Image: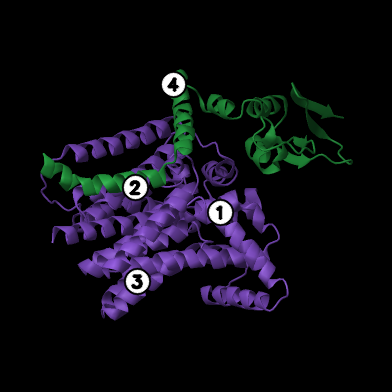
Amino acid sequence: MRLAISYLLGLSLLTLLMFGTNLLGLPLNTTNSLLLFALTIIPLIILYPHLPSTPKISTSPSKLNKILKGIILVLSLVVLLNDSYRIVGEWDSLTLYDFRARRIVETGSIAKAAEIQGSYFYSYPLFTSLFHSFTYLLGFSSPMLIYGLIFISFLTIFYSLLRTHANEFLSLLGTILLIFAPHLFWHAQIAYTNLAYATYLSLGALFLLEWKDNKSTIFAILGMFFTGTSVWVRSTEPFWLGNLLLFLVIGVSNFRFKDIFYGLLFFYPLQQLWKRYVAAMFHNVESTVSQIQGSVATVATAAIQPTFLQLLSDTIVFFTHSIVRPYAPVLLLFAISLLMQLTKRRLSLFLISLIIFDLLVSFIGTYVFAITQSYWREIPGSLERMMMFISPLIIYVFIITIDSTKKNYGQ
Amino acid sequence: MVNKISRYSHYILWILITFLIFIRVKSILVSSSNFIKTLEPIFQHPFATTDEKLTMKYPRYYPLIQEIKRLTPEDATIYLPIVNIEYGQPLWALGQIQMTQTLLYPRTVKKYSEELTDGYLVFYTDTTQGIIKLE
């Protein structure tokens, strides 16, 4: 797990360093990129022994577990094989993420690349574009392998976090379910931002839950740094808010103010980074609070319009089509988990609240989008991909629910 | 043995439930064929170049892009026909100015208009495609 965490931390640090130093005037070329890579490695080497590791719990070897491990291994190898061959070829990735990367490589400057592409350049933060640039500067023809390694790191950390709470069999089962969850396996083989977003956001939440039980500051820092990185991957979605609330509720209710300070220290700059950069470029600054106030005002204004009910019913239909239907298997697992936990009166209150909060945010967000944008019906695929992060959270809650039921049977 | 089965029956039940939920028969078939399709080129063309891979992905569109690149200078203006090609059709991307602009960079790509004066106009029919130099 340490290696997987280091990889994801390293990707985030490297791209942040590339961004920061280039804004300060350091050209992005091969030598400087290697220097920045070395600078990224140093803190990771220092941090490595302090990172959480996969729990070593001795269990009797089982054939079933070996089969499950075999399936995970084969599917991981397939992803790596495919990614070592694939190129960036999808519409969005070619026109935005990869185009930016190639212009940054050509000009050595983020500002000049932005000048070439115009306002479209600022649609999303530069996380994936900068690691594309990094691979091109090192002479590789495709950055796809990085996506495969993000996916494998995701599986490794997910398994390890599950393993601290569930037995080996259930942890492996959960990991296989994660591979089969909607979109994830496919997104490990295309150059979209959704896989990285789902990885950082959901692992951020799971680290925070681990912090609740484990009380170790490193989990608070990892949780908030990963959540912050999710905003550095995709800044338009407001789901970081759920993780932040979870963090504050756990921290305040347990009087862990020192951890809250460290967590916010690693989260806030990342959450603000892209927004501030774009605002500086367009001379337009809007605070997060005023954005939330704006959304609330929009919904409130719409609620008194005669078209309110019609638009609401259209949004429900659209939401059912874009979220409920594609994620039906996962949502069914959530319903089963909820039912089982309610009957056993042992609720994973924090995680369940977070999932419900995120689903509510996605519904309200769709509604706000429907009110404010005339083309809102044209993005069902985008909304569907945006919710990829919900599957890991639900599978996690499902597995720990089964595990607690099994323990009850045992008793 | 009986003990072992009863010990695992709980797990087996959950495997069945979860897999039934996750993978319906239709989606298994669809994903398997897609899955094999994505792996095919690795074995058929293991040493393909980036251009060859893009040609495999966009069979009519990408060769046209390469041809335009070959025939026009980097400062040329390329006019795209006003088309509405259905998504998934071989030349679908021709209607997407952003995509064509990306692949033809640093050339300027514009939609066809009555006032075009200098540059190159892209044309296509059911079976062929190319460019015409505007004088």
Q: CA distance from mark 2 to mark 4?
A: 40 Å
Chain seen in green? B
**Which amino acid does the dot numbered 2 rest on?**
Ile
Q: Establish if A303 lies above or below B119.
A: below
Work out whether residue A239 can be spotted: no
Q: Name the residue that disc number 3 marks.
A: A247
What color is chain A drawn in?
purple
Q: Name the residue that disc number 4 marks.
A: B46
Pointers 4 and 1 in contact (C-beta within 8 Å): no
**Local secondary structure at mark 1:** helix
Residue sitting at the far front: B2
Q: CA distance from mark 1 to mark 3?
A: 29 Å
Quadrant location, the C terminus of chain A:
bottom left
The percent coordinates of residue B9 (x first, y second) are 21, 46
Residue A237's disc is none
Q: CA distance from mark 2 to mark 3?
A: 33 Å
Please state the chain letter of the residue tagged with numbered disc 2 in the rendered image.
B
Q: Name the residue that disc number 1 marks.
A: A322
The percent coordinates of residue A194 (x first, y second) are 48, 50
**Local secondary structure at mark 4:** loop
Q: Residue B64's image quarter?
A: top right
Q: Name the residue that disc number 2 marks.
A: B17
**Which amino acid does the dot numbered 1 rest on?**
Ser
Q: Say which of marks 1 and 3 sits in front.
A: 1
The percent coordinates of residue A291 (x first, y second) are 57, 73
* Camera-side residue of B60 and A381: A381
Pointers 2 and 4 in contact (C-beta within 8 Å): no
